């Protein structure tokens, strides 16, 4: 079933991809133009999706319950980190992210806190000081 | 024997205590930088070019240090491929296929050692080839036209179906997905914005390294939760720390074959190290996969792509030095490095500045040896990474991935893209779709399309040009033969084994 | 805890290996909106190097390659997130202005502050050493007879500056817009790939800048049919100009820099004066000439006006020869 759903999604993607390509006009003196390659590509992509719909593999076991919750929470932490790294500055954002990730993976608050306290300065020293790749130190609001 | 005289002079300049110390330092720094996901040879060299200036190094010393960083970073990229299933840079993706399964079987040290030795063999093979045949091979590169490049990419994609053990339909779909992702951005031939959804952030398309780190590193974290609870202890007891001779032996034949294939791919400007790694892996798999051990931790599956991509990087120096064409991302870095030192590669470099060329070649030999000497004893330290508990290792890996990407682009958009790719990678892995073809499509697709369009511009729209040169005809024949043998073999396999007996685990 | 310590030890080792302060955030940054090896990369790297060597800047200039969309990607990037960064400059040239004039960048020339140009590259028309064509007349006679018989190429897309320079010559040779669209043009990722592919027999003519491919001219692998300059090029005085063959066309490609549109006057003036100091140094003249550039200075407001003017001229030319409608 999962393969069939994936196949359908991919079929829809291929069709959209091929149709959208039609909007790209051939440039001046370019016989093939920007549309041809995507259109050609859409054909095998669509056929292969059909193949997947017709001959799916057995379903994998999808996670449920607590595990799914932890996975969703992890994604949320990562998105939040991406959005908050600049506004909060590196130390606060990284401390919070490491703390939450360690906790999510499954350890005590104490160990997670220790990991965060050690890792945030360590990473800062590694990237900013040693490698000279600047990181935002203070909140910028 | 004029060549050897030049080379000896090159070594004379290069082999001073200061230069050896610089080589050691460069290898070490490069290895560390390369092992951080998201940072590769490009960043390693970029980070250390200013240092070379501020230390006021002469060109030879600077070249030695930077070549050492370059090799070190290439090797460092393998460490995270093998230990964590996270490729440190583009060519390292093939190393995850067998390297990570080896690590899971407790053979991390062996995999690292084989990777080191194979890299050394590949790089040395290419450097010798460069020493002896550079001007001759540069001529060959000239006669490879757009239609021939297109045929080469067709060959590469035709072999992708056989790369991973999973359902071939899924592997090919993954390649299509990668090719689609690769068309996002401004089209180089006409400047048309494609699939950018109106966002300037997407004008340059998806950066392969952001995609790689997302697909592999972020998805790894999500997979981890499931393994944890299922009770299958993911981390494996460590094997030996210092590998035995007998562990290395099976990799030698594969390394030599991989070196040849990779070197040929490398000489062609544009094809580069990633293609070298892909081709050597698929050739090796066809030759050696008699007991269906590839993809499950076969040492030859580590040796071949490692030798292949290093030989390709070395081979790519030939068009770079003799023509001034940067063959691949990694040689582009070397070219930038030379230009920074006020050396302009091109047809006259060998005549006008032989001391520079031979100094560089000598420094490549030195960097190679130093890397081997430095890293084999350090394998023990690297493998300790695996003994870290997951709750400290995983946040560390994730943070390093984020910061590696962020410190280069300073863009939270890239970080979000990375998380998006992570989610995609997780779903694909759950469905038993290999991630490698996605990345290959993304890496090679643009060049494939551009060369097709160039060929048709040359022919004024006639598709006949694609099969007019002997080179492209030869490549298509090889493609057809490969596909035919693959079809025959899979039919035979199906007869021999009852359907459904092949069980794939998540981690493949 | 013990494991964390070993990770810390690993990082500390790394720290030991890398003496601190390799580069700092305040160091100036130059974006080369192309891959290494081409003209924009040369501009950033050479100017960056000389700025430090001549003692004009203390810290080394960090060069960042940001290829994509013939400079459009870097343009969009500076516009969106670096428009007030006083430490950032971006290399550009006539090629970039052509793209802007044809609406292929995300914004017009007013989105940036134009700093200065330090020199100009000269367009050349090249054929392989064994080509039957020896003059522009030979070439255009063949093209007029059968426009499809000659495959031309260069480092820009159709409609880009290399292509336009060819069309300007074709116009001077008496060809008309209806023939322009039939001229076969192949884009390569730089002048060097274009020349090597021509040497391999894939194409017959390359129009591009002299600087990047000067080595092939010196080595005799290619023949120069015309240099598109007013006067013979100082470093290559023997190359025939288009003008000397009766084609009243020049095709320079200046090399210069812009910075973000919201950079303060103070930072802008500082950059202009730094670049002017560099321009007046002997080292720049040598480096420029060694790479086939003719040193020419325009800076500050004068340069800004020049860019705006050139963009509108380029738009008119593009319209005239049918590249844009």
Image (spheres, coloured by chain):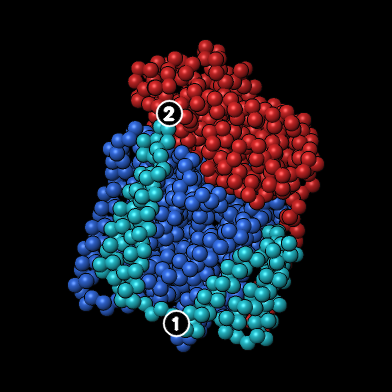
Residue plotted at (25% across, 67% down): A54
Task: Identify the disc placed on residue C121.
Answer: none
Residue plotted at (57% across, 35% down): C100
Q: Chain of mark 2?
A: C
The residue lying furthest to the left in this view is B495
Among the 4 quarters of the image, the one containing residue B405: bottom right
Asked whether, in this view, residue B460 is left or right of residue B338, the answer is left
Give the quadrant of the N terminus of chain C. Answer: bottom right
- Please state the horizontal and vertical placement of residue B422, each as a whole percent of the image: 50, 67
Among the 4 quarters of the image, the one containing residue B177: bottom left
- Please state the horizontal and vertical placement of residue C29, each as a whole percent of the image: 69, 47
Q: CA distance from mark 1 to mark 2?
A: 61 Å
- Please state the horizontal and vertical placement of residue C107, each as a whole percent of the image: 59, 40
Among the 4 quarters of the image, the one containing residue C290: top right
Please tell me whether residue B465 is drawn above or below residue B289 in the rendered image: above
Q: Chain of mark 1?
A: A
Q: Which chain is blue?
A: B
Is residue C98 in sight in this rendering?
A: yes
Say which element carries label 2: strand
Say which element carries label 1: loop
Q: Which chain is cyan?
A: A
- Please state the horizontal and vertical placement of residue C237, each as a whole percent of the image: 61, 19
Please tell me whether residue A125 is drawn above or below residue B309 in the rendered image: below
Task: Identify the disc placed on residue A64.
Answer: 1
Q: Which chain is red?
A: C
Taking depth in this image into account, of B149 and C167 the one nearest to the observer is C167
Taking depth in this image into account, of B255 and A103 the one nearest to the observer is A103
Residue plotted at (58% across, 58% down): B413
Q: Which residue is mark 2?
A: C152
Evaluate whether label 1 is on the same chain as label 2. Answer: no
- What crowding class fits label 1: few (fewer than 14 Cα within 10 Å), some (14-19), or many (20 or more)? few
Taking depth in this image into account, of B62 and B468 the one nearest to the observer is B468
């Amino acid at each position: 079933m999962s393969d069939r759903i994936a196949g359908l999604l991919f079929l829809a993607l291929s069709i959209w991809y091929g149709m959208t390509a039609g909007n790209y006009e051939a440039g001046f003196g370019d016989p093939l133009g920007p549309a041809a390659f995507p259109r050609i590509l859409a054909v095998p992509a669509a056929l292969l999706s059909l193949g997947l719909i017709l001959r799916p593999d057995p379903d994998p076991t999808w996670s449920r319950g607590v595990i799914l919750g932890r996975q969703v929470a992890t994604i949320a932490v990562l998105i939040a980190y991406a959005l908050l790294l600049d506004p909060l500055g590196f130390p606060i954002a990284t401390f919070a992210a490491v703390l939450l990730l360690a906790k999510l993976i499954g350890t005590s608050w104490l160990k997670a806190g220790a990991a965060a306290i050690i890792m945030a300065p360590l990473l800062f020293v590694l990237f900013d000081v040693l490698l000279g790749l600047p990181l935002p130190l203070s909140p910028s609001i | 024997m004029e060549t050897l005289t030049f080379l000896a002079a090159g070594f004379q300049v290069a082999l001073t205590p200061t230069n050896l110390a610089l080589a050691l330092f460069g290898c070490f720094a490069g290895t560390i930088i390369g092992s951080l996901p998201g940072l590769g040879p490009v960043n390693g060299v970029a980070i250390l070019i200013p240092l070379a200036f501020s230390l006021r190094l002469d060109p030879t010393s600077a070249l030695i240090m930077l070549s050492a960083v370059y090799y070190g970073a290439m090797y460092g990229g393998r460490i995270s491929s093998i230990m964590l299933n996270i490729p440190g840079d583009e060519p390292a993706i093939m190393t995850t296929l067998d390297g990570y399964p080896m690590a899971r079987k407790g053979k991390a040290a062996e995999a690292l050692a084989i990777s080191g030795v194979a890299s050394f063999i590949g790089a040395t093979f290419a450097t010798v080839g460069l020493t002896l045949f550079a001007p001759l091979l540069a001529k060959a590169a000239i006669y490879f036209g757009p239609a021939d490049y297109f045929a080469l990419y067709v060959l590469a994609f035709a072999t992708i179906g056989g790369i991973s053990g999973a359902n071939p339909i899924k592997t090919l779909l993954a390649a299509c997905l990668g090719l689609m992702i690769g068309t996002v951005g401004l089209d180089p031939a006409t400047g048309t914005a494609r699939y950018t959804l109106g966002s300037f952030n997407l004008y340059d398309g998806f950066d392969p390294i952001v995609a790689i780190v997302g697909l592999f590193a972020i998805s790894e974290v999500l997979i981890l939760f499931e393994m944890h609870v299922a009770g299958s202890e993911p981390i494996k007891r460590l094997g030996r720390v210092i590998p035995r001779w007998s562990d290395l032996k099976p990799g030698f034949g594969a390394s030599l074959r991989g070196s040849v294939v990779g070197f040929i791919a490398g000489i062609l400007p544009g094809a580069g190290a990633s293609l070298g790694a892909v081709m050597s892996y698929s050739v090796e798999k066809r030759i050696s996969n008699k007991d269906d051990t590839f993809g499950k931790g076969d040492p030859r599956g580590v040796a071949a792509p490692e030798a292949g991509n290093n030989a390709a990087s070395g081979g790519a120096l030939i068009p770079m030095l003799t023509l001034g064409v940067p063959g691949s991302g990694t040689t582009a870095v070397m070219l930038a490095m030379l230009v920074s030192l006020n050396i302009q590669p091109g047809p006259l470099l060998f005549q006008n500045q032989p001391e520079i060329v031979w100094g560089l070649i000598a420094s490549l030999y030195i960097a190679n040896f130093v890397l081997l000497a430095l890293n084999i004893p350090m394998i023990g330290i690297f493998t300790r990474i695996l003994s870290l508990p997951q709750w400290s290792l995983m946040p560390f890996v994730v943070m390093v991935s984020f910061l590696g990407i962020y410190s280069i682009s300073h863009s939270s958009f890239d970080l979000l893209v990375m998380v998006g790719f992570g989610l995609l990678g997780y779903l694909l892995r759950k469905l038993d779709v290999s991630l490698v073809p996605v990345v290959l499509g993304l890496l090679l697709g643009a060049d494939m399309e551009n060369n097709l369009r160039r060929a048709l511009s040359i022919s004024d729209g006639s598709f006949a040009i694609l099969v007019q040169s002997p080179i492209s005809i030869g490549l298509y024949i090889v493609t057809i033969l490969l596909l035919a043998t693959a079809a025959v073999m899979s039919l035979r396999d199906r007869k021999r084994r009852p359907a459904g007996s092949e069980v794939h685990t998540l981690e493949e | 805890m013990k494991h964390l310590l070993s990770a810390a030890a690993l990082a500390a080792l790394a720290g030991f290996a890398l003496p601190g302060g390799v580069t700092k955030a305040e160091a100036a940054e130059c974006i080369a909106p192309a891959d290494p090896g081409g003209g924009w990369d040369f501009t950033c790297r050479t100017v960056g190097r000389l700025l430090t060597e001549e003692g004009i800047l203390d810290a080394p200039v960090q060069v960042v390659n940001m290829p994509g969309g013939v400079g459009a990607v870097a343009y969009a990037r500076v516009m969106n997130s670096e428009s007030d960064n006083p430490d950032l400059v971006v290399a550009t040239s006539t090629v970039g202005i052509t793209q802007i004039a044809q609406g292929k960048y995300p914004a017009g020339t007013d989105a940036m502050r134009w700093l200065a140009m330090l020199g100009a590259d000269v367009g050349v028309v090249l054929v392989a050493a064994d080509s039957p064509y020896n003059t522009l007349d030979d070439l255009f006679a063949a093209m007029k007879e059968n426009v499809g018989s000659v495959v031309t190429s260069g480092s820009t897309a159709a409609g880009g500056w290399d292509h336009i320079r060819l069309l300007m010559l074709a116009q001077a040779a008496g060809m008309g817009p209806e023939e322009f669209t039939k001229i076969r043009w192949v884009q390569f990722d730089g002048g060097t790939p274009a020349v090597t592919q021509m040497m391999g027999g894939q194409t017959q003519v390359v129009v591009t800048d002299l600087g990047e491919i000067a080595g092939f001219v010196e080595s005799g692998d290619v023949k120069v049919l015309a240099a598109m300059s007013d006067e013979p090029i100082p470093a290559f005085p023997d190359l025939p100009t288009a003008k000397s063959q009766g084609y009243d066309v020049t095709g320079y490609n200046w090399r210069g820099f812009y910075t973000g549109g919201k950079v303060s006057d103070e930072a802008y003036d500082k950059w202009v004066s730094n670049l002017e100091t560099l321009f007046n140094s002997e080292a720049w003249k040598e480096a420029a000439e060694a790479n086939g550039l003719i040193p020419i200075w325009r800076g500050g407001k004068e340069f800004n006006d020049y860019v705006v003017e050139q963009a509108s001229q380029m738009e008119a030319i593009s319209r005239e020869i049918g590249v844009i409608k």
